[in-house]
Amino acid sequence: MEWKKLLSNKRFGQEQYGASSDKARSDFQRDYDRLIFSSPFRRLQNKTQVFPLPGSVFVHNRLTHSLEVASVARSMANIFLNNIESKNPQLIKDAPLITEVGNIVAAAALAHDLGNPAFGHSGEAAISRYFTDGDGKVYQKDMNDAQWHDLINFEGNANAIRILTHPLKGKGNDAYALTYSTLASIAKYPCASIAGKRKELLHRKKYGFFQSEEESFEKIANELGLEKETNEYLIYKRHPLVYLVEAADDICYSIIDLEDAHRLKILSYEEVKGYLLPFANSKTIEDRLTNDYEDDDAKIGLLRAKAINTLTKTCADIFYREQESLLNGSLNKSLTDLIPEPYRSAWKAVEKVSVERIYNFSSVIQKEVAGYKIMAGLLEEFVPALIHNNTHYYKKLVKLIPKQYHTDLTDIYSRTQSVLDFVSGMTDLYAVDLYRNIKGISFPSET
């Protein structure tokens, strides 16, 4: 793969138009702005990151997380660009759009969680299980194998590509019209679901696009020159900038989950300090913690900032060093997997405590279990309603689905996807309220 081809400001759905003449904003900055003002991005404020949505104690949600990932991704890309300018300036002449890598990955980072349903991975699992073990099993006979694999392995990453490329009814035909490079930088797993999961291959641990978007992704991949792995199924190697978005995501949720865990008193100050201090890379940090700060939250904030700064610089340098393997598609590890000592051991310790103490905390598990029931309950009602729409009850349910999620297509796969567009786009709070109302648990208010 070549940087000159990998970086394109061609817009999906608006290929007939050239580059923007706006001198104040580049095409990739416009991608960022379009996402910031979009409805799916705004809805992330009511989707949980890890912990249930806060009461008196504020913790991160999907929106604040995405903004932070965008900030870290931009910093990493700019460090990479600084290395290019000082060590390989010819590349800037050969591929002038490489100066925009910071804006590209920042936009991609904003969008990386857009496809996650309410309740995160629990929501994904509930959607999949509805088709493997629930009432949705009956629809397998109405779909081909590739379509069925999409549903029984519902994937938020693929859903993000669908949101950004699929035209909703009444919303125009060019969706968000993001640039090809921004869209490709979101695709962590650039392959079809029917290709099957290969846990030993980084780019095939999951999948990145539904059958309905296969043609769209193939067009993007061909335009950018993504390396095709096989002709049996649609499988590509990653766009190199995916690694920066992925690393920024890894850094933010790993380090900031510790900060949230401290705020919620799951981990003590001394515990979190012990995990973050190895990343501080400062001889004066202990004195500053002792003499400059009294508040423990402020101390953790300082340690968090130091840790993110260290990891950002480390991963950016790894990204520059691994240019050859990135461009030939052979790098089979994430940037955070390549973090060297002394930081590697500290990083592994953070991963371990996160699984043992944070992700299995009682309120987190309760949220996941509740979300599982809620998402499954919504699908039990709306999928058969939209597919059949042949009873008074079903007709009433269909009226609850906004017109933008309806489709003129009559095949079962397309109608099912329309319901999934509706349900997966819900915020946690809206999903809970709608579930209670249609199940008769509570009575809807006038508002």
Image (cartoon, rainbow, N blue to C red):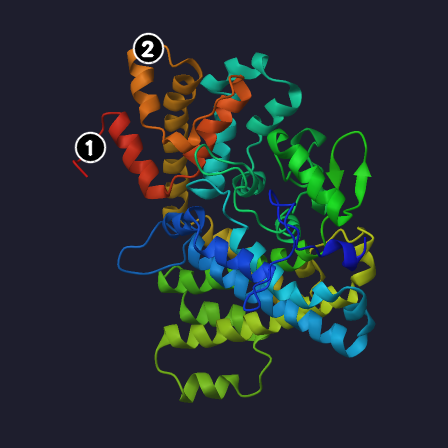
Q: Tag 2's secondary structure? A: loop
Q: Which residue is mark 1?
A: 444
Give the left or right position of residue 426, taking residue 234 as reference. left
The front one of 8 and 66 is 8
Sequence-earlier tag: 1 or 2? 2
The front one of 321 and 360 is 321
Query: What crowding class fits label 1: few (fewer than 14 Cα within 10 Å), some (14-19), or many (20 or more)?
Result: few
Q: Which mark is residue 391?
A: 2
Residue 289 vertical position relative to residue 103 in the rendered view, above or below: below
Residue 193 vertical position relative to residue 160 in the rendered view, above or below: above
Quadrant occupied by the C terminus:
top left
Residue type indicated by callout 2: Thr
Q: Is any part of residue 341 visible from this angle?
A: no
Q: Is any part of residue 399 visible from this angle?
A: yes
**How many numbered markers are drawn?**
2
Callout in the foreground (1, 2): 2
- Residue 4 image point, x, y percent: 78, 59
Q: Tag 1's secondary structure? A: loop
Q: Which of the 4 quarters of the picture holds residue 351?
A: bottom right
Q: Which mark is residue 190?
A: none
Residue type indicated by callout 1: Pro
Residue at point 44%, 46% (across, down): 40
Give the left or right position of residue 174, taking residue 431 as reference. right
- Residue 18 image point, x, y percent: 65, 53
Give the left or right position of residue 162, taking residue 61 as reference. right
Residue furthest top in the image: 390
- Residue 178 image point, x, y percent: 58, 50
- Residue 389 image point, x, y percent: 38, 14
The front one of 154 and 360 is 154
Asked whether the beta carbons under mark 1 and mark 2 sit within 8 Å of each other, the answer is no
Residue 423 vertical position relative to residue 335 in the rendered view, above or below: above
